[in-house]
Image: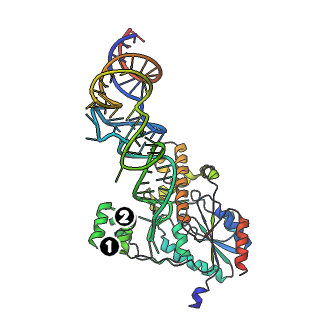
Amino acid sequence: MVAKTTKSFLIAIVGETASGKSSLALELAECYNGEIIAADSRTVYKGMDIGTAKPSREDQARVPHHLLDISTPDMPISAAIFQQRAHKIIDDIAGRGKTPFLVGGTGLYIDAILYDFTFHGQADTRERQALQQLSVDELQQRLHDENIPLPQNYKNPRHLIRQLETRGMHGERHTLRPNTMVFGLTVDPEKRKVRIAERVADMMQQGLKEEARRLFNTYGEQCPALQTIGYQEFVPYFHDIGTLEEVQQRIVRHTLAYARRQRTWFRRNKDIHWICKKEEVDVLITTELNK
RNA sequence: GCAGGGAUAGUGAAGCGGUCAAACACGGGUGACUGUAAAUCAUCUGGCUCAGCCUUCGGGGGUUCGAAUCCCUCUCCCUGCA
């Protein structure tokens, strides 16, 4: 019992895409003898580098990063798998007397750690593929037949499939993990658009097109992991539809929409300390450490 | 110059006498979401003192109980003949 509550110290840094999480995390990790765990559903895949703004080799040399490149796009990582691996690494880092920093923008992955989600119902790829052929109506009918209540998003095929897989079992959500501080980075709405546009232009410069082409050639256009902003937009272009200009514009728009979704996810989290400068974090961490 | 076709909400595009504030797509806003989550889904998107009212379908004028839809005319755009 006691052992459970003496969890190691953990600092989480969350926020929308292009909010500066990575560079802040880097600074803090250097400052507080830390290591970084990327809580990101796309940087876990090898080969998806430019489009995911994966930390560079130099950054990784400055501070050890974890859960980057742990799989390939054809071997999907789920929230549950991510959680298991992250737990182990957090313990490992703490065991070596260092401070783990959980950094990322994938809300579900972050929360799975912060609130120690219990997941129910293993996903069976075969069965899932079969279910994916069904329409929303058919999936709802199926749930009805098996006496399983509809999920909250009852028109969402993915959630319907999941509901079938878990047979309606609901995972548990616990209170915030002990010894944990959660920081959220805010972005000036005025600057958001410019920042994202610049970032996307930058990715194009770095060869995003070639990276995308290589990935699609290797794993196919249907590969779920490649249904990612920054890659999917190239598909029509590779079929000679539209210009590169349009691809870039679409990536920017989709990224903006994604950032919005991230905001609505994190906004609900009352445990987040919203900040916009490193100094604010320093004050909070220092007082926490002195307790 | 003559003969045709067209102008519709932020954009593209339906509608072709009433059920039209006007389909649909895109774009935009808001939200949901515990084993696909950078995914997926819902919802709103002319204005307002919002179960009703007001102003819209290139401009103006008619016909009609009633027009985005019919007629006349003007402006601009595309097509065939000159």
Q: Secondary structure at mark 1?
A: loop
| Residue A241 seen | no
Mark 1 Cα within 10 Å, few/some/many (few <14, many 20+)?
some
Q: Secondary structure at mark 2?
A: loop
Q: Quadrant of residue A94?
A: bottom right
Give A70 or A139, whichever is nearer the viewer: A139
In the picture of the structure, the residue carrying the numbered disc 1 is A148
In this view, A176 is above or below A51:
below
In the picture of the structure, the residue carrying the numbered disc 2 is A154
Q: Amino acid at mark 2?
A: Tyr
- The image's colouring method is rainbow
Q: Looking at the picture, do discs 1 and 2 lie on one chain?
A: yes
Q: For mark 2, name the chain.
A: A
| Residue A24 seen | yes
Please name the residue shown 26% across and 71% down the image.
Answer: A145
In this view, A225 is above or below A235:
below
Q: Position of residue A113 (x, y in %)?
A: 55, 75
Q: Quadrant of residue B59?
A: top left
In this view, B1 is above or below A246:
above
